[in-house]
Amino acid sequence: MPNGGGTLSGIEGETHDMKAASILDYRELARRKLPPFLYEYIDGGSYAEVTLRRNVDDLADVQLRQRVMCDVSGIDLTTTLFGAEQRLPIALGPVGLSGMYARRGEVQAARAANAAGIPFTLSTVGVCPLAEVAAATGTPFWFQLYVVKDRNFVRHMIAEAKAAGCTVMLLTVDLPVPGSRYRDVHSGLSGASGFAGSIRRGLQAALHPRWAWDVGLMGKPHTLGNVAPMLAGDTGLEDFLAWMGGNFDQTVTWESLTWLRSEWGGPIVVKGILDPADARLAVEHGADGIVVSNHGGRQLDGVPSTAQALPAIAEAVGDKLSVLVDGGVRSGLDVVRMLALGAKGVLLGRAWAYALAANGQAGVSHAIQLIEAEMRVALALTGVTNIKDIDHNILVRDRKFG
Ligand code: FNR
């Protein structure tokens, strides 16, 4: 494909192809390409998906002030996060199982991030292990850690992350127990384990031959690469959420952060903060950053959107650490909104996962290009030329977002 976009083939009976023009187009392309058990896993949230919808809707409600007659001929989007300069104030956040959406998906996404000059974050529960991503990209990336019950294994993963040259560790703390995701039960990812589950997923794969060839056949092994040694032969893809529920350490406290800091030695970013009190505790316990996150509406349904939670958290911690955010970001406009609400950087989640599923590395590169182009327009039309100058002054004040 010429410049990396996916195509939306017309609805049945039509012959034209339409190029993806937005992240939402990539969502639709992903829906068509993936077997439902994988598409619903990416797209869905927990319980009634109230928080998932709030993340998207609240961001859309953040109104920007249009300013004119400013010289906007030179726009600077570069920023520095954890000592490293990057071309855009975004990163690819951790998305588990990405190697099931496209062949060796984590490697493809990491290459796209490198080419765009932004960080890629490898999930603990990625398909490709740390060493594979490091060997394939040769560029530093970030690692996301889930603390499992076996602390020796946590030490082992930290050692692997160091050996892979990872520069930043994201410690995800909002999943001591997995929230229930109804769509995963309905689609056959969870709840239908064993033979019945395999048959259901196999039938879905057979009806999606492009995926079946690219990933099902050519994308093996389908193991959770980083934790495969702990599973000893059992891949964990069978009722994946149940596996997480059984193996994640529910005893983690702020003291565990002190232990991890001594083991890791580099910058630690606590992912899953939604309350100013926890943000202050992160500062007290020496975190270098936080990600304001509700796990993309996949954990405690009913909590506020991240757009709503962010301003009070940013105010509570000031510049004592770097405040990142994710949740509901589907465009460059959304990135700019998050920066205006107080974030220093923004993680993409589903946005890049949809593009990866639709068109691999080229899809992720194109999705990042789309987001960059939208950011440039948003800055120009709010009259700001440097991303570092984005703050609440570009927003129309309203009661919801303080
Ligand atoms: C996630 N997320 C996630 N977070 C994490 O720390 N480790 C992980 O392995 C995963 N896995 C994962 C899989 C899928 C399919 C999704 C959609 C999300 C959460 C992710 O990092 C991020 O917090 C949300 O995706 C942000 O919300 P949006 O942008 O996807 O709406």
Image: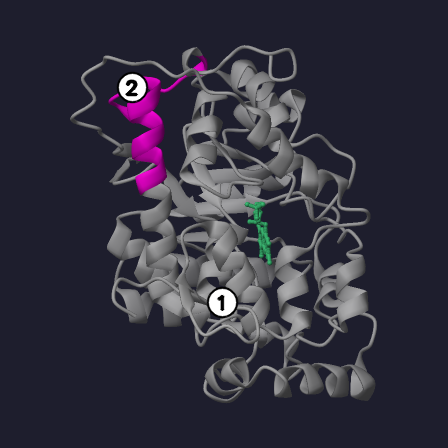
Q: Which dot marks residue 111?
A: none
Determine crowd level at label 1: few under 14, some 14-19, many 20+ residues with C-alpha closer than 10 A: many
Instruction: Provide the secondary structure element on which disc 1 rests.
Output: helix
Q: Which dot marks residue 357?
A: 1
Q: Residue 375 at x, y = what percent?
A: 35, 34
Give the residue drawn at x 16%, y 27%: 74
Q: Amino acid at mark 2?
A: Val
Q: Nearer the viewer, residue 220 or 60?
A: 60
In the image, the segment drawn in magenta is 373-392
Disc 1 + disc 2, Cβ < 8 Å: no
Q: Residue 398 at x, y = what percent?
A: 60, 12
- Mark 1 or mark 2, which has the lower sequence index? 1
Give the residue drawn at x 66%, y 32%: 305
Q: Residue 171 at x, y = what percent?
A: 55, 45
Q: Which dot marks residue 384?
A: 2
Q: Is residue 172 left or right of residue 46?
A: left
Q: Nearer the viewer, residue 34 or 256?
A: 34
